[in-house]
């Protein structure tokens, strides 16, 4: 039971990081980046290939998230900005970000081959006993990074001028421009940050998976569910709480129902959560969907 | 017309939102230290003119010069960096942020000059002492009059060449209107140049040196508060209906 909770929380921290990444860019631009999972993937692939080529695995751990960060900015300029610039109320980004993700996925598969590679264990082969349960160094690291990410984001959002201008851009992009903020840069920085977080999630989980170009989609779905359960669009920290809950539910489903249950059980919970607390994403009671004068391009 | 002391020159501005121009052939000027009013009925195009000056209209022709600079092609955020600032229609405060955060955001382009920002903040608080008292309050919890003060304060924080105000008196109690008008008069005393959109002729007359009357998207009359005072009723009936 305790072991199950621990594994749940650590995988949940990964879902939570991905949910936070989604919610940061959503928070400022009202766009859900369906290519977010591919940022996690590219960080894993970059790190795996570097280590395969004989570099110190920690170099890949540093450069992988950086690649994800660059991909985040690219997804903004290719998948988001052209759509919002043409029509700021368009939902075309649903298709363009999804398409961007698929193109990236296949480009990577073409470049490095579609096969799965191993990933260096990093701290995963350091077991730490907690009573009856065992947790690895890598899992502890994931939990610490998740806690740090929540605290750091709350700090940026509430206490820094950049966080305040991000909130202003979210609330009224036209007015944000009118006070001198370049909302394009604010948005691009936001996407860079969410790419970075997704990439960090990638190198945290990779020692427990393989490096495969097609693993982004699944993580994107779980990140999205984490954000929705937690009510993340209003506050990125909520996405982390949603992620932790989701992780425990998924692990619990695997141990108590059957080994495939984590594929459907969390979604059942999502539906129940949204029925009970209907401040779901596309609900009009969600304050984020108050009529807004404009949207940043 | 000597252009030397014109701080704002709008020439043949036309623009709008969809396929049709909402305003046409707008040519107006503002001298340094002058206050000019734009009067006109609902839907005349007053807000559209201010949006045009602020660079917020997607379709626009004509030229706009602020100070010595042709800002016609500038994006809004560049115009906002020292050329013009706006207290927009409907105030448009950053509702979930505090009064002081709203004000500090107004000085976003001066964020690397903290002493300057502090001095501007002090001068806004001197103009509207109530805002200092409420500085940590969420701006949406303020009364309409107080919110208008925040909107004006946020505009002043940019410390630009020209100030654009869009119906600052709307929906305010007589007392609040009086506070706003007195603040505008005080700004004029300090040498500010302002373009004031108003539907209330009395407010515009108390603040402005000159008035343009806008109707159907065009300037139909250029006049002064004195003339309006003399033949006010006639003029108002003619255009403001
Ligand atoms: N965002 C918009 N999209 C389309 N048309 C608009 C938009 N904003 C204003 N208009 C139209 O442009 C015209 C002029 O509007 P504008 O807001 O400039 O008038 P106004 O003089 O400021 O009126 P009011 O005194 O009511 O504020 C109106 O006919 C209005 O319907
Ligand atoms: Mg108006």
Image (cartoon, rainbow, N blue to C red):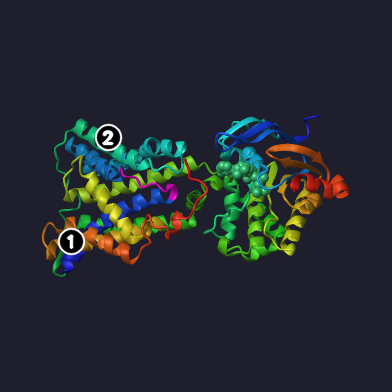
- For disc 2, the chain is A
- For disc 1, the chain is A
Q: Residues within 10 Å of mark 2 (few under 14, many from 20)?
A: some
Quarter of the image for residue A192 reads top left
Position of residue A115 in the picture relative to residue A70 (left or right): left
Can you say which quadrant of the picture contains the N terminus of chain A? bottom left
Q: Main secondary structure of the magenta part?
A: loop
Residue A61 location (% of width, % of height): 26, 44
Position of residue A276 in the picture relative to residue B166 (left or right): left
State the extent of the magenta-drawn residues as a range.
A28-35
Sequence-wise first label, 2 or 1? 2
Q: Quadrant of ligand 1?
A: top right
**Depth order, front residue of B38/A209:** B38
Q: CA distance from mark 2 to mark 1?
A: 32 Å
Quarter of the image for residue A142 reads bottom left
**Depth order, front residue of A281/B74:** A281
Height in image: A238 above or below B212? below
Q: Is residue B23 visible?
A: yes
Q: Nearer the viewer, mark 2 or mark 1?
A: 2
Q: Residues within 10 Å of mark 1 (few under 14, many from 20)?
A: many
Respond whether the residues carrying marks 2 and 1 are from the same subunit. Answer: yes
Position of residue B44 in the picture relative to residue A223 (left or right): right
Position of residue B82 in the picture relative to residue A227 (left or right): right
The residue at the point 54 percent across, 45 percent down is A174
Quarter of the image for residue A260 reads bottom left
Dot 1 corresponds to which residue? A251
Element carrying mark 1: helix
Residue A154 location (% of width, % of height): 42, 58
Element carrying mark 2: helix
The residue at the point 21 percent across, 43 percent down is A57
Height in image: A262 above or below B3? below
Dot 2 corresponds to which residue? A103
């Amino acid at each position: 039971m305790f072991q199950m909770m621990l594994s749940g929380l650590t995988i949940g921290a990964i879902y939570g990081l991905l949910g936070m990444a989604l919610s940061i860019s959503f928070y400022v631009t009202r766009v859900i980046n369906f290519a977010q999972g591919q940022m996690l993937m590219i960080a894993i692939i970059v790190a795996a290939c570097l280590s395969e080529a004989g570099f110190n695995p920690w170099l890949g751990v540093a450069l992988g998230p950086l690649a994800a960060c660059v991909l985040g900015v690219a997804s903004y300029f290719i998948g988001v900005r052209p759509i919002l610039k043409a029509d700021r109320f368009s939902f075309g980004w649903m298709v363009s970000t999804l398409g961007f993700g698929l193109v990236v996925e296949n480009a990577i598969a073409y470049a490095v081959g579609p096969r799965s590679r191993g990933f260096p264990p990093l701290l995963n082969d350091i077991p730490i006993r907690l009573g009856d349960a065992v947790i690895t160094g890598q899992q502890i690291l994931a939990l610490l990074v998740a806690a740090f990410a929540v605290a750091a984001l709350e700090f940026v959002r509430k206490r820094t001028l950049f966080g305040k201008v991000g909130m202003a851009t979210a609330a009224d992009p036209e007015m944000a421009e009118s006070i001198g903020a370049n909302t394009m840069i604010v948005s691009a920085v936001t996407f860079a940050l969410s790419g970075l977080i997704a990439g960090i999630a990638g190198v945290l989980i990779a020692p427990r998976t393989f490096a495969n170009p097609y693993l982004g989609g699944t993580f994107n779905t779980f990140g999205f569910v984490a954000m929705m359960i937690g009510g993340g669009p209003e506050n990125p920290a909520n996405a982390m709480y949603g992620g932790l809950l989701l992780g425990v539910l998924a692990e619990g489903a695997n141990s108590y129902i059957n080994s495939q249950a984590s594929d459907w059980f969390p979604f059942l919970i999502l539906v129940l959560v949204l029925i009970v607390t209907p401040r779901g994403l596309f609900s009009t009671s969600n304050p984020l969907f108050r009529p807004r004068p404009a949207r940043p391009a | 017309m000597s252009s030397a002391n014109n701080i704002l020159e709008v020439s043949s501005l036309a623009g709008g939102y969809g396929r049709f121009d909402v305003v046409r052939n707008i040519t107006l000027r503002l001298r340094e230290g002058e206050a000019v009013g734009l009067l006109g009925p609902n839907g005349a195009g007053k807000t559209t003119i201010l949006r045009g000056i602020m660079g917020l209209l997607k379709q626009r022709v004509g030229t706009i010069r602020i100070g010595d600079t042709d800002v016609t092609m500038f994006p809004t955020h560049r115009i906002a960096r020292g050329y013009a600032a706006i207290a927009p229609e409907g105030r448009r405060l950053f509702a979930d942020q505090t009064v002081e955060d709203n004000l500090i955001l107004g000085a976003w382009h001066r964020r690397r000059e903290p002493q300057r920002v502090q001095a501007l903040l002090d001068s806004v608080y001197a103009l509207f002492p109530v805002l200092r008292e409420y500085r940590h309050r969420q701006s949406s919890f303020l009364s309409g009059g107080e919110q208008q003060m925040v909107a004006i304060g946020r505009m002043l924080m940019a410390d630009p060449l020209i100030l654009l105000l869009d119906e600052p008196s709307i929906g305010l109690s007589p007392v609040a209107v009086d506070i706003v008008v007195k603040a505008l008069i005080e700004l004029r005393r300090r040498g500010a140049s302002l373009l004031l959109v108003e539907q209330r002729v009395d407010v515009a007359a108390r603040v402005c040196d000159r008035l343009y009357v806008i109707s159907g998207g065009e300037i139909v009359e250029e006049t002064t508060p004195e003339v309006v005072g003399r033949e006010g009723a006639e003029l108002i009936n003619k255009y403001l209906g």
